[in-house]
Amino acid sequence: MFIKFTIFFVFLISFSSSQIFSQSDGMQTESVYDSVYAKKLGADDYGMKTYIMAFLRSGKVSSKDKEESQRLQMEHLNNIVRLAEEGVLVLAGPFMSSDQDIRGIYIFDVTTIEEAKKLTETDPAIQAGVLEMELIPWYGSAALVELNNIHKKIQKISITDQ
């Protein structure tokens, strides 16, 4: 009898606790699922999708000419803007430490490494051998594809306005 009472009591406490936690502020997230929006973003049932992440690494070529380096950097940035405007580049940015082999990342809204490879081959810094890409499939929130639209609303100066 004691065991049955204990099991019942533990069940009752567990159920009560879950009700308390689910009703307290900030503890429960109510679903506001929008199937049309999810489909537009390419989301699966978890609100996720597959992207291709690119790690930009230092290439085998190092330009000693400052003018050439600046030209390549500007062409690299113009390429980033173009890919973002085409909707295939979701996110791009450098790492803040310059002493690392990994210089930055891209997240491409494509499903295969082959597609991402073709996109990376359009980058003048890749073509010059200054940067190399390591491409890896990545599973993340489908909401990332909205990032560029949000960024346009908060960006005061473009990376290509130099």
Image: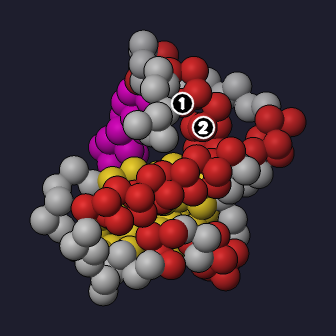
Look at 64% across and 51% down and name the residue there.
82
> Over which residues does the magenta segment extend?
1-18
Residue receiving disc 1: 151
Q: Is 135 on the left-hand or right-hand side of 37? A: left
Quarter of the image with the C terminus is: top left
Residue that sits furthest to the left in the current view: 99
Q: Is residue 17 magenta?
A: yes
Look at 46% across and 34% down and name the residue there.
161
Residue receiving disc 2: 148
The dot on residue 131 is: none
Please determine whether, in this image, residue 120 is positioned above or below residue 159. below
Quarter of the image with the N terminus is: top left
**Residue 122 image position (x, y, % from top left):** 61, 70
Q: Name the dominant secondary structure of the magenta segment.
A: helix
Amino acid on which disc 1 is placed:
His
**Residue 20 image position (x, y, % from top left):** 42, 19
The reply to whether residue 46 is in sight is no
Amino acid on which disc 2 is placed:
Asn
Look at 47% across and 21% down and name the residue there.
156
For residue 108, what is the image quadrant? bottom right
Residue that sits furthest to the right in the current view: 36
Please determine whether, in this image, residue 19 is positioned above or below residue 117. above
**Residue 77 image position (x, y, % from top left):** 48, 52
Asked if the residue at tag 1 contacts the one at tag 2, i.e. Cβ–Cβ closer than 8 Å, the answer is yes
Q: Is residue 88 magenta?
A: no
Q: Is 135 on the left-hand or right-hand side of 109? A: left
For residue 100, what is the image quadrant? bottom left
SS at mark 1? helix
